[in-house]
Amino acid sequence: MSWRGGRAAPWIAVSLTLGLLPLAPTWALTLNVQVEGLSGPHAANVLAQLSIEHARSDSDLTAERITALHRRAPEQIRAALAPFGFYRVEIAAQLDRPASGAEVWRAHYRVTPGEPVRVASVDYQITGAGAANPVFPKTFPLTVGAVLNHADYEQAKSDIRYAASAAGYLDYQFAEHLVLVDLVSYEAHIVLHVITGPQYRFGAVRFEQDLLDESLLNRYVRFKPGDVYNPDALLGLQGRLLGSEYFSDVEIMPLKDEISVDNRVPIQVIAQRNRANKYRIGLGFATDVGPRLTLDYQRRYLNSYGDTLRTALSLSPTLSQWELDYRIPLRDPVRDYLIIKPISTYYDTATRLGWTHSLQIAHSSLTAGGWRRNIGLDYRYENVALYDHDSAITSELTPSLSWSKTVADDPVNTQRGYRIKYSVVGSLESVVSETSYLSAQLQFKGVRRFAQDYRIIARADLGATWAQNLSDLPAGRRFYAGGDSSLRGWDFDGLGPRDPVTQEIIGGRYLAVGSLELERRLSGQWSAAIFTDFGNAFDPDYEHSIAQSVGFGVRWASPIGPVRCDLAFGVSESNADGSPPARLHIVIGPDL
């Protein structure tokens, strides 16, 4: 036992000695990479392909690894420039090793790309059933004498591939496709032979689903049997069916194993019905109406004809509303439908107190230019008092016509877009109405981003009513101004012609309101704004003036739209102490 212990003792001593030795000092190596002689996309592609450039941020760099990456760099630079046609690249590479381990390693590459190779010949052929089809270019985009840019070559191939697919040549193939670069003569030769194969056409469309009548589904199909087969048309059909909300999943399959002798491809559509009911409960706030509770119920389908129903109840201290929207799809179910909409509204504002009930029936259609056009009839019953006056009960049947259009890059937080609406409504005293009038209104709002961090927002609201007297108009058909989306600095409906005796606001036959707002992004989702609002509601039988406010505010771009908090000063009026009245406005929701 003692002999064995004697043999182990030296090893133990050596181990302890090594463990007590101080560790050799280490430093994190710093690497600087510089490429000269290139700019633009050439420089960007070189840096993207250069391994030594990507290694700069590594925390475990060693001298051996830097040296190895430096040796590989010239080959990587040449490979990165070849797609642009540079095959005679000269590179002066230099790696400066620091004298001390804590200093910076410097890798320097001076690149002389030289002249790019040019195309000397192009062998481009289209053969097969579609050889004469004009969808295929007659000449190849890269012509003799052009610089050989491989991205342009691949794009030309991609364009031909798309043209063949969109024109129904499903079996097309590139029989031969290559680019030969002769480094001795320094010229390029392109060979591209395309065989189109037969042209296919759409066959019958079969639907596999258990929800809707097939006559309705066929109206979603915008191609007919015999039309040239185009995959984009199938994607469009899938998008329309999913957008209808009737279905949660839509799969479209061309049945290539059932192609007819005349090259017609049957199409099978398999659709899974969506959940029938959709509920939504919302809480909101706006200065005009105060806190608001919204209950929303949607029935995505009621029957096999595709009728839909939506009902919503909005409750707030000053303005509450219930509405039901029943829609019947017509000839084009995406763009064309009949709307039946009863609405009940309760007002308890600074100017109005009472109920308005209406029943609207309208034909809504989307025009080729993207305008939503509504033509309909509106039966309206109103029992509303203006201030302390007794309630005025009126009923009317009014034809209505409106065009509206909204264009936005982002419907929630818009950076560029606009909303515009024209509307005309009127009644005749002898046709289920107690008065005659004709009213027209134009509403516009535009948003434009510029200089990266700025947005300008412009708004206009113009209206005119032709009626013999203001008293001929029900309270709900008169124009008022003031509020969050009108003239900030005043209450909702707090501006307009006033009764000369009581000084109460009674509304007018004309409206002209405008707004300009400049917004600047501060940080992240936060921005600040300055604005001015101006205009009023007018009537020729009463005194009127232009109201104006100025103010500032902050914005937060939330997932449901901007949260806007504004402080507005009514500079066209003054308090007893001479200061302008001020009002805080808080609004949540999209700009458009």
Image (cartoon, grey):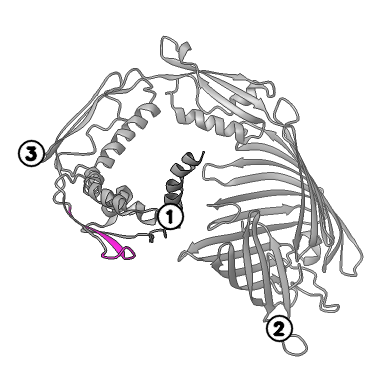
How far is disc 2 from disc 3 in space, using C-alphas? 84 Å
Outermost residue, bottom side: 577
Q: Write the residue at 72% across / 87% down.
A: 579
Looking at the picture, does residue 307 appear above or below residue 68?
above
Q: Mark 1 points at which residue?
A: 17
Helix, strand or loop at label 1? It is helix
Looking at the picture, does residue 446 appear above or below residue 264?
below
Dots 2, 3 in contact, CB < 8 A: no
Outermost residue, right side: 390
Tell whether position 108 is magenta: yes
Which range is magenta?
99-112
Q: Mark 2 points at which residue?
A: 580
How far is disc 3 from disc 1 in space, using C-alphas? 66 Å
Q: Nearer the viewer, mark 2 or mark 3?
A: 3
Dots 1, 2 in contact, CB < 8 A: no
Q: Percent from the top left, x then y, of residue 394?
A: 85, 55
Helix, strand or loop at label 2? It is loop
Residue 184: mark in rendering: 3
Is residue 380 in sight in this rendering? no
Left or right of 239 on screen, residue 474? right
Q: Write the residue at 58% across / 29% down.
A: 220
Q: What residue type is labelled 1?
A: Thr
